[in-house]
Image (cartoon, rainbow, N blue to C red):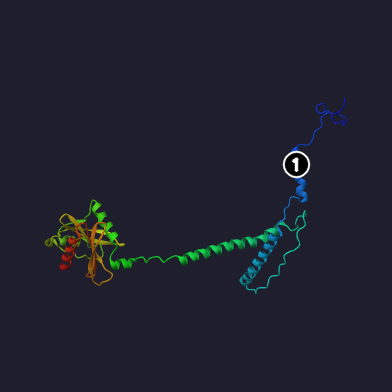
Amino acid sequence: MNKPDDPNHTNPTTQGVSIAPSAAQSEASTLGKMLRDGSLRHDAPQSLRERLRDELAHAERHASPAADEANGTPASPPPEVKPDARPPKAGKPDKRPEAAWGLSLAPWLFGGAGGAILGGLAVAMALLVARPPAPPQDTPEAQTTTGLQPQEIVASHVRALLSQHPIDVISTDQHTVKPWFNGRIDYAPPVIDLSAKGFPLEGGRLDYVGGRTVAVLVYRTDKHPIDLYVFPARDKGAAAPTITGADGYAIARWRRGGMTYWAITDAEASHLRVFVEALQAAT
């Protein structure tokens, strides 16, 4: 009987059968051989190599003076970089380490990013220069001088009409309405009784317009309420009444006695004009 380690011993299951290497093993062997002999390497075109060297030299020339100035040392001219005019030999890999390629490409890549940033800034500056100037906005001081914007008065008037309490102090007596504002605002609004002129006083309330709390006196003509906004004017000079319309409302504004007045109603503009004239005659 032959021993298991007998060189003459033949496995009956494999006797007469030759085992050939698989296709995968053959391909792996071929690929490994190509990797070792460098036949898979593809050299960059000579024009690309020269362009990279030129840009590297340009980046070094610009970077060296800035680094010398930061260190307080005079700048020295960079060494002249001469591109290698000899074409690389086919089939032989470049002996330069991979790290050297990374260092040579870094200034070129960062230089390209810097150029893109500078280009974007230039475009942004051009857009800003070409952009037409924005129209001047009214400052709070200007709004206080001219009163308010009509849209804000309209919004305040409509908001009061829609609320359940459009009047904070309900009274037809001017000596009841005027003291009610004491301690609630920092000025005393003039309260005039115009019932003899057909505009009875109904009361008053506080509202917030133009960035401050203001007094609002509520009058009535027939079944139409008239809201009279009164607050101190920054410009103490008098201004004649002007009557305009906005969103179906008649609006009047003027300055008198150091106060700014706004009056708004859904009645006819002629009724509002009579109201303003009666109020000015009483003050």
Q: Which residue lies furthest to the bottom in this view?
A: 74
In the rendered image of this protein, does residue 27 appear above or below residue 74?
Answer: above
- Mark 1 lies on a secondary structure that is helix
Amino acid beneath label 1: Glu
Q: Residue at x 61, y 61 (%)?
A: 110
Numbered circles on residues, count: 1
Q: Which residue is drawn at 69% across and 61% down?
A: 47
Q: Where is residue 68 in the image (x, y as percent from the top left)?
A: 64, 71
Q: Which of 49 and 277 is in front in this view?
A: 49
Q: Residue furthest top?
A: 1
Q: Position of residue 161 (x, y in %)?
A: 23, 53
Q: Nearer the viewer, residue 270 or 214?
A: 270
Residue holding disc 1? 27
Q: Which residue is drawn at 64% across and 62% down?
A: 108
In the rendered image of this protein, does residue 3 appear above or below residue 92?
Answer: above
In the picture provided, is 33 more to the left or to the right than 232?
Answer: right
- Is residue 184 visible from the viewing direction of this image? no
Q: Name which quarter of the figure residue 257 lies in.
A: bottom left
Q: In which quarter of the image is the C terminus?
A: bottom left
In the picture provided, is 163 more to the left or to the right than 136?
Answer: left
Q: Position of residue 280 (x, y in %)?
A: 18, 67
- Is residue 111 visible from the viewing direction of this image? yes
